Image: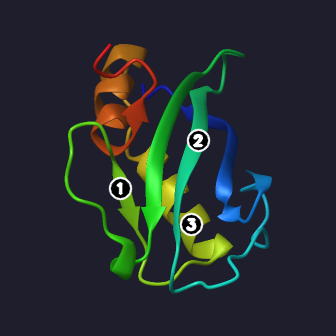
């Protein structure tokens, strides 16, 4: 039986100038970028399991095509053709759902393919 993963929180500093933004992916409407074709920000994710209250911290750079960073083992990138809250929500929710496995260790291995774990490389 798969461990059901749960996105406990998602936030960034960089989508809107000088403002911390928290995302609520329970809703289809949310923060929008001033220039949806020109986006680059680090999305912080707290992910755990539905049955537990704890979470691990992960991150991913959200970018549009003209902001694609160079490949690095210290980054994970989610490239959207054009930013919208709904597109971001869809990609993040699908990516997390694809990481559900029989135990937390196996979930972590999959999560680390898509997101940078807070302890990566330490």
- The alpha-carbon separation of the residues under discs 2 and 3 comes to 13 Å
Q: Residue at x 59, y 84 (%)?
A: 36
Question: In the picture provided, is 39 more to the left or to the right than 117?
Answer: right
Q: Residue at x 34, y 45 (%)?
A: 114
Return the residue at label 2: 44
User: Which numbered disc, 2 or 3, marks the residue closer to the eye?
Assistant: 2
Question: In the picture provided, is 112 more to the left or to the right than 63?
Answer: left
- The alpha-carbon separation of the residues under discs 1 and 3 comes to 12 Å
Return the residue at label 3: 88
Q: Position of residue 117 (x, y in %)?
A: 41, 28
Return the residue at label 1: 77
5 to 33, vertically: above or below: above
Q: Is residue 31 visible?
A: yes
- Dot 2 falls on a residue whose secondary structure is strand
- Dot 3 falls on a residue whose secondary structure is helix
34 to 109, vertically: above or below: below
Counting labels gives: 3
User: Few, some or many C-alpha atoms within 10 Å of disc 2 (few <14, some 14-19, many ≥20)?
Assistant: many
- Quadrant in the picture for residue 19: bottom right
Label located before the other in sequence (2 or 3)? 2
User: Which numbered disc, 1 or 3, marks the residue closer to the eye?
Assistant: 1
110 to 85, vertically: above or below: above
User: Few, some or many C-alpha atoms within 10 Å of disc 3 (few <14, some 14-19, many ≥20)?
Assistant: some
Q: Are marks 2 and 3 in contact (CB under 8 Å)?
A: no
Question: In the picture provided, is 90 more to the left or to the right than 14?
Answer: left
Label located before the other in sequence (1 or 2)? 2
- The alpha-carbon separation of the residues under discs 1 and 2 comes to 12 Å
Label located before the other in sequence (1 or 3)? 1
């Amino acid at each position: 039986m798969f461990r059901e993963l749960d996105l406990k929180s998602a936030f960034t500093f960089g989508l809107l100038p000088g403002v911390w933004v928290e995302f609520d992916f329970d809703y289809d409407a949310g923060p929008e970028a001033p220039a949806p074709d020109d986006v680059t920000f680090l999305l912080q994710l707290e992910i755990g399991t539905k049955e537990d209250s704890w979470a691990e911290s992960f991150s991913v750079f959200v970018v549009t095509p003209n902001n694609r960073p160079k490949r690095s083992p210290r980054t994970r990138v989610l490239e959207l053709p054009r930013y919208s809250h709904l597109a971001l929500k869809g990609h993040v929710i699908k990516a997390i759902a694809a990481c559900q496995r029989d135990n937390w260790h196996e979930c972590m291995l999959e999560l680390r393919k898509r997101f940078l774990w807070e302890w990566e490389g330490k």
